[in-house]
Image (cartoon, helix red, strand yellow):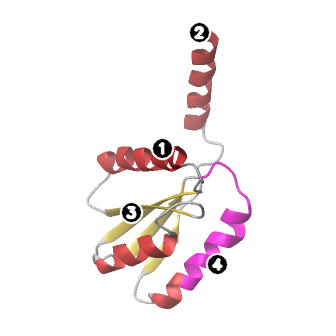
Amino acid sequence: MQQGVILLGHGSRQAAANHEIFQLAEQVKARGDNALYETCFLQFGEPSLPTAIHKLVAAGAKRIIIVPLLLTVGTHIQFELPRLIQEQQGHYPEVTFVLAPHLGADDRIAEIVVDRIKQGSES
């Protein structure tokens, strides 16, 4: 079964911020498997989640994992994303949608923060 992965950023009105999400997505894809990948945004950026889902389904994805590139649980994780996914499930009943955990408080992120503190101390 062809699997799709959506890397979902919040989105920003600033193109440079959205560009960083695309950069991160390229890094993830380079480490990934044979899945189909799309990058999209909840708001203030394009493409949107429905557009990314449509592209993956058109490419043959039957299972789509949505990975929110968000640090904390909030309205988007608790309410908006489940609602959007349920809405898309209605459009694509033949597709299995999986909402992966958000980034959250993870030791690997803590390591990055410690590294940034060191970088700040050196300047």
Q: Residues within 10 Å of mark 1 (few under 14, many from 20)?
A: few
Q: How many discs appear?
A: 4
Can residue 102 be seen at all in this image of the molecule?
yes
As helix, strand or loop, the secondary structure at mark 4 comes to helix
- Residue 75 lies, with reference to residue 53, above or below; the image says above
Q: Amino acid at mark 4?
A: Arg
Number of other residues with Cα within 10 Å of mark 2, as a class: few under 14, some 14 to 19, many 20 or more: few
**Overall secondary structure of the magenta stretch?**
helix
Q: Which residues are magenta?
A: 70-87
Instruction: Please identify, in this view, whether the residue under mark 1 or under mark 4 is nearer the observer.
Output: 1
Amino acid type, label 2: Glu
Side (left or right) of 40 relative to 1: right
Circle on res. 20:
1
84 vs 78, nearest the viewer: 84
Where does residue 88 sit, x and y in percent of width and height? 52, 82
Q: Which residue is mark 2?
A: 122
**Chain-order first, disc 4 or disc 2:** 4
Q: How many C-alpha atoms fall within 10 Å of the one at disc 4: few (<14), some, or many (≥20)?
A: few
Residue at label 4?
83
